[in-house]
Image (cartoon, rainbow, N blue to C red):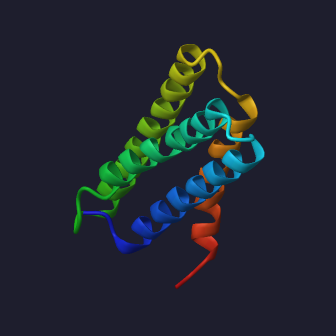
Amino acid sequence: MVNPEVRRVLRLQASLVGLAVLISLLVGAGSLVVVVSTLLGGVVVLVPALVYARIAYAKRHVPPAALIKAHFLAEAVKFCLTVLLSGAVLAGFKDLSVVGFLGGFFAAISGYGFGLLIKN
């Protein structure tokens, strides 16, 4: 089970990706390629973040060394998954809008930073 703070950050990331998709819809003049590229950029960040949360917070009430080990493992998996998903998108989506992809990517990444700054 993921704790409420992590859930809040993940929700903020998803919300910012949704906002980026809406902006790309308006700025991209309704171009489906730009919208899909923006969405894929966000997914490349969101999926590894969800996997990180599942791995890092799978065990509760364990010694600190086990918690640190879980977080290191989760970060390694997150990094590898981000690289693999980015490569898959770049290799598989030939009409990719790089600006849209990076917009979605950075929207999701910024959600992490803002989520740590904003306290409810």
Say which residue appears at 61% left-offset and 49% top-offset: 21
Front-most of 71 and 91? Answer: 91
Q: Residue furthest bottom?
A: 120
Q: Residue furthest front?
A: 30
How many marks can you see?
0
Q: Of residues 26 and 78, which is closer to you in this image?
A: 26
Say which of 79 and 70 sits in front: 79
Residue 28 versus residue 120 in the image, above or below = above
Coordinates of residue 73 in the picture (x, y in percent): 38, 42
Q: Is residue 61 above or below residue 118?
A: above
At x 46%, y 40%, the residue is 78
- Depth check: give the residue in front, 115 or 77: 115
Residue 92 at x, y = what percent?
53, 15
Q: Is residue 36 left or right of residue 28?
A: left
Query: Residue 97 occupies which quadrant of the picture?
Result: top right
Asked whether residue 109 is in view, the answer is no
Residue 101: percent from left, percent from top: 66, 35
Q: Is residue 16 left or right of residue 78?
A: right
Image side of residue 72 versus residue 40, left or right: left
The N terminus: image quadrant:
bottom left
Residue at left 31%, top 59%?
57
Observer able to see residue 88: yes
